[in-house]
């Protein structure tokens, strides 16, 4: 797919790795197959897209990669051990890849949204969402616009000196 995009358009300017799945289960109740699926989607998918797209970006000596993480990682949310762990892997990978690609003009950053009304949270009980929001400095669900604001910052030409950063929304600190 990456080769086809480069063939058709001559380049790839930006990569947004925002695919993600979760299984809101206690770690002791999470089947191994579910754990493998979460890691395959959230971490391995991010790794593979970064690896292939970065090859094209490094050749041009410019590019922006933005990976998606979650506030579930710094908040260490109970019932989300596998999801949080998969995104912690994405965060570590983001920071190391930023160092590996920095000299090539490619920046790599991550955004960690608070819950945004999407399919990912549609089955989360209201009480659990309220408890999560109570742990944030800004106690509301995030919006698509909140996330887009950070992504646009990371993608901006003026952000060429910003790399290896993980920015959580809602006033959550890592």
Image: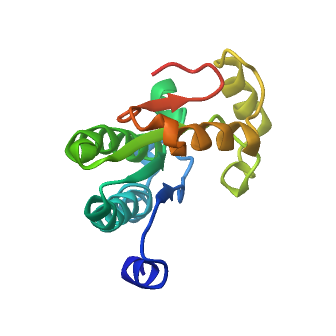
- 128 over 123 or under it: above or below: above
**Left or right relative to 106: residue 22:** right
Judged left or right of residue 85, residue 126 is right
Q: In this orientation, does residue 34 appear?
A: yes
Locate the N terminus by quadrant: bottom left
> Residue 162 versus residue 61: which sits nearer the camera?
61
Residue appearing at x 26%, y 42% in the figure: 102
Residue at x-position 62% and y-position 19%: 171
Q: Quadrant of the C terminus?
A: top left
Between 117 and 29, the residue placed more toward the observer is 117
- Quadrant of res 50: bottom left
Q: Is residue 56 left or right of residue 68?
A: left
Coordinates of residue 86 in the picture (x, y in percent): 39, 47
Report which quarter residue 34 is drawn in. bottom left
State the count of labels.
0
Q: Residue furthest top?
A: 137
Q: Residue at x 57, y 47 (%)?
A: 24
Q: Is residue 77 visible?
A: no
The figure's colour scheme reads rainbow
**Eyeballing the image, is 56 above or below 47?**
below
**Foreground pick, 149 / 89:** 149
Q: Whole-percent x and y of residue 109?
A: 42, 40
Q: Nearer the viewer, residue 5 or 116?
A: 5
Residue at x 66% of width, y 27% of height: 132
């Amino acid at each position: 797919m990456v080769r086809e995009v480069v063939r058709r358009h001559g380049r790839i300017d930006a990569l947004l790795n925002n695919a993600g799945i979760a299984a809101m289960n206690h770690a002791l109740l999470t089947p191994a197959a579910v754990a493998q699926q979460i890691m395959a989607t959230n971490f391995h998918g991010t790794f593979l897209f970064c690896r292939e797209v970065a090859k094209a970006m490094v050749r041009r000596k410019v590019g922006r990669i933005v990976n998606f993480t979650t506030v579930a990682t710094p908040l260490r949310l109970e019932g989300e051990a596998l999801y949080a762990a998969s995104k912690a892997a994405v965060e570590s990978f983001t920071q190391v890849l930023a160092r590996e690609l920095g000299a090539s003009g490619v920046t790599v950053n991550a955004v960690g949204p608070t819950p945004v009304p999407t399919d990912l949270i549609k089955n989360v009980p209201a009480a659990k969402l309220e408890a999560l929001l109570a742990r944030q400095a800004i106690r509301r669900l995030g919006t698509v616009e909140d996330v887009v604001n950070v992504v646009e910052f990371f993608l901006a030409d003026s952000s060429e000196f910003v790399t290896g950063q993980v920015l959580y929304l809602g006033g959550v600190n890592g």
